[in-house]
Image: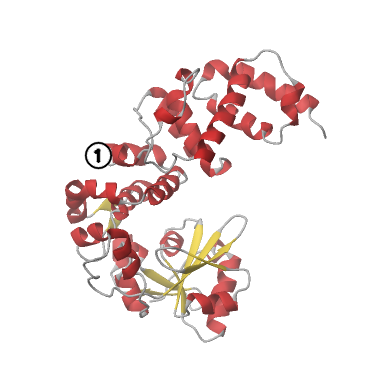
Amino acid sequence: MKIEFEENLISRRALEALSILREKGFDAYFVGGAVRDLLLGIAPRDFDIATSATPFQIKNLIPSSKIIGKRFKLVQIQGKKEKIEISTFRRDPGEPPENLSLIEKMRWKNRFYGSIKEDALRRDFTINSLYLDPIKKEIIDFTSGLEDLKNKILRVIGDPYERFMEDPVRMIRVCALSCRLNFKIEEGAEKYIEILKNEILLIPKARIGEEILRILKSGAVLKTFEFLERKGILKLIMPFSYNFSKKFIEALRIIEKFSQSFKDEELFIFLFFSLNFESLRGRGFNNLIEKDSFLYRKNFFENLKFYYDITLKIFLSKKKNLNFLKSKRFLRVLKFASKLSFVFPEYKKNVRDWKTFYYKYRKN
């Protein structure tokens, strides 16, 4: 089916990678969120390519790429502003052996290559299973995804119960997509979210962290967090205690506005401080973060302490110290503290004074 889209929204590097695969005789298409966003007139953040080439064939053809993935192997090309991932067409092999754990079953199901149609049927939602040929400007649609895109419906491919049980992360994703795109979740899927939400507790914590990070960068974090709270999901995935206080809501709004200027870990530190900053003096961080969460690790606590110590000085110290300016990370924390002062406006004046001091005495 012929389709119109804004060609200037397509990544040049992604198009080059797709063209290389095609020139060597492989099938290759844009797929997933990038195609969905292109058809909605939204600039994609990342580009996914699905191809008949295997990961090692892709790696040999595109020297700047690398093979990644534990659940299944795919190829990644990392740019300054974009991420391109290339996966081989896969198929659903049916029921895995009974003696495997949940994680092993998920890995097993992703090891089998297939056709483009089989690949489409194993994807999560119909609007994410559209394949775009950017050269011919054609869409391949096996799941009525175009119709659902037009009607603003989020529909799970296959039986929602089976697909949510297969990978409970899909319950988080469908809620986040609904909020970001302002699409309605199909009735059957919404019903099973209520029934199966506790299955989310079985998801590896690292994957939970990835999903929360996507939400924090989505531009609709407040709406999504409120929706997840109503569904009883947010309490299952947050790495620390929270409440929808005025400061927490303001923090979510600041993240929406400035998400691209935060480093990934800063987003979690910012949220944590919005809830705990005023009560942290003299207290340890460890007992405020869930021990089995993706944040409970040594380097996160080290960063948390560093940001806390410097931000506390910026917020409270009237006496400026040139020694602070020697730290390469001071400016990073100063910018962080500036954003945090919107949550704690009583410290705004001191932040402005530190900014003036920094730009006056920094080494050029």
Q: Does 184 appear above or below 308?
A: below
Disc 1 residue type (three-letter): Gly
Nearest the eye: 227 or 322: 322
User: Looking at the image, which residue is at 74% across and 28% down?
Assistant: 325
Nearest the eye: 15 or 311: 311
Residue at image mark 1 = 232
Secondary structure beneath label 1? loop
Tell which residue pokes out farthest to the top in this image: 318
Instruction: Pinpoint residue 323: horizontal percent, then vertical percent.
Output: 75, 24
Q: Is residue 86 left or right of residue 358?
A: left
Nearest the eye: 345 or 76: 76
Q: Is residue 329 left or right of residue 119?
A: right
Instruction: Pinpoint residue 348: horizontal percent, then vertical percent.
Output: 58, 19
Look at the image and tell me whether residue 312 can be seen.
yes
Q: Is residue 145 left or right of residue 49?
A: left
Instruction: Pinpoint residue 10: horizontal percent, then vertical percent.
Output: 54, 64
Nearest the eye: 311 or 33: 311
Image quadrant holding the C terminus, namely top right
Instruction: Pinpoint residue 203: horizontal percent, then vertical percent.
Output: 32, 51
